Amino acid sequence: MSSNKSENAAPFVIWTLRRTGGTNLAQYLFSASSYPYIQHEPFNRERALGYITKGWTATADTDALESNLREALSGNILIKHCVELVPDAVNSALTDVSCANGYRHLFLIRRSPLDRLLSLHFAKSFNIWGPDHSKFASEAEISRRLAGSQIPVESLLNQERDDRERLSTVYNSLLAHGIMPTIAVFEDLYNRTDCNVARALFARVSASLGLAAEEDQQVVDTILFGGSQRTRDQYRDFRNHEDFEREVSKLGPFQLGSSPGKLARDALQLPEGSVASLFALRRSWRSDLVRIEGVGVDPADPDADWRVSDSNSSYETFTGLRSENFQANNSALPNAANARFAAIDVPEASLGEVSVRLGRFE
């Protein structure tokens, strides 16, 4: 790990939900900061700052709640916080006090809720919250018990709806405070398929918190691509897994904030004969930025490149990304297997002026 501490550093809060996959990332970010940190989820009732949550629950005294939070945050401690584990009033007060104390804010979310909800139910069912589940039960025993279990479909769907609402409430409150939160999306950050994009996102997330760049690439790759708890495949042993997966899909992907704006009608500019398309826009790694992504090739010029720009800027564009679906549908086209691109730093305010071009550029 780099030993450099940035002069631009600030204390920060990581806002998230259980089973989102942020433990290792949070620990790295905490260790890279010059500010002190305590155990994760410190406002849970049984943890270091749980007295604040228990005090509010017992008295509903807003003044005492805010006073206790001001005292706790006066030391500029770093915080990883799961919003669904405390009352809404604690989340609201933590938002206000952390903003007043100059904290920065990172949201760690999963776009797809399926694996998070299954992981949450699995952890609750077996009381397994860490990676070494073999200490608690053998894989054969776990599979046997899963095969005899039903997923509580409606309960977990309601959990996801409530969790989304509570995390979005904090996010919107920060926007009202004039804060531009950073957003780390699990599926983008821990993406072995798009390694270079994932590394770039990691660097941007770190910089947004005022942390110095990590110089050891192996450290970064271990954080992003270092493995999992190996329980995912076992989730299919639940008797009603397919039914649950179908119902969860109806919720749609989770994103913070309103849907991004739109590109101009003539934004996509292609050479004649090209086969290409743009994907739906989605919010990128910061609340005011949009990710523009698409796929395509020019059969007459297989080495043509993608450029995303406006009248003032040309945005870094990652090209040559894997495009298995495009290849399956366009197998005769050259370079169809690596025809996808992504630009992750496009300001939402500039979307009406952005052009997306395929061609040769100086």
Image: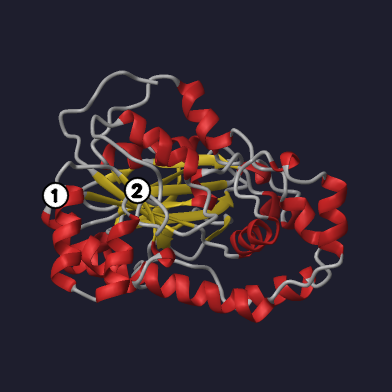
Residue at the (47%, 22%) spot, across then down: 217
- As drawn, is 254 to the left or to the right of 3? right
Q: Height in image: 119 above or below 159?
A: above
Q: Can you give x and y, in whole percent of width and height, for residue 22 in the image?
A: 48, 46
How many marks can you see?
A: 2
Q: Can you give x and y, in whole percent of width and height, for residue 135 in the image?
A: 73, 39
Query: What quarter of the picture does the C terminus occupy?
Result: top left
Q: Nearer the observer, disc 1 or disc 2?
A: 2
Q: Which of 172 and 312 is in front in this view?
A: 172
CA distance separating discs 1 and 2:
22 Å
Q: Which of 309 and 69 is in front in this view?
A: 69
Q: In which quarter of the image is residue 328?
A: bottom right
- As drawn, is 114 to the left or to the right of 318? right
Q: Height in image: 99 above or below 199?
A: below
- As drawn, is 272 to the left or to the right of 233? left
Query: What quarter of the picture does the N terminus occupy?
Result: top left
Q: Which of 131 and 359 is in front in this view?
A: 131
Residue at the (27%, 59%) spot, across then down: 288
Q: Height in image: 115 above or below 303?
A: below
Circle 2 sits on which residue?
48
Residue at the (25%, 69%) spot, across then down: 92
Q: Can residue 43 be seen in this view?
A: yes
Circle 1 sits on which residue?
102
Q: Earlier in the sequence, mark 1 or mark 2?
A: 2
Q: Can you give x and y, in whole percent of width and height, for residue 164 in the image?
A: 45, 71
Specify the color scheme.
secondary structure
What amino acid does circle 1 point to? Gly
Residue at the (19%, 40%) spot, across then down: 10
Q: Which of 105 and 30 is in front in this view?
A: 30
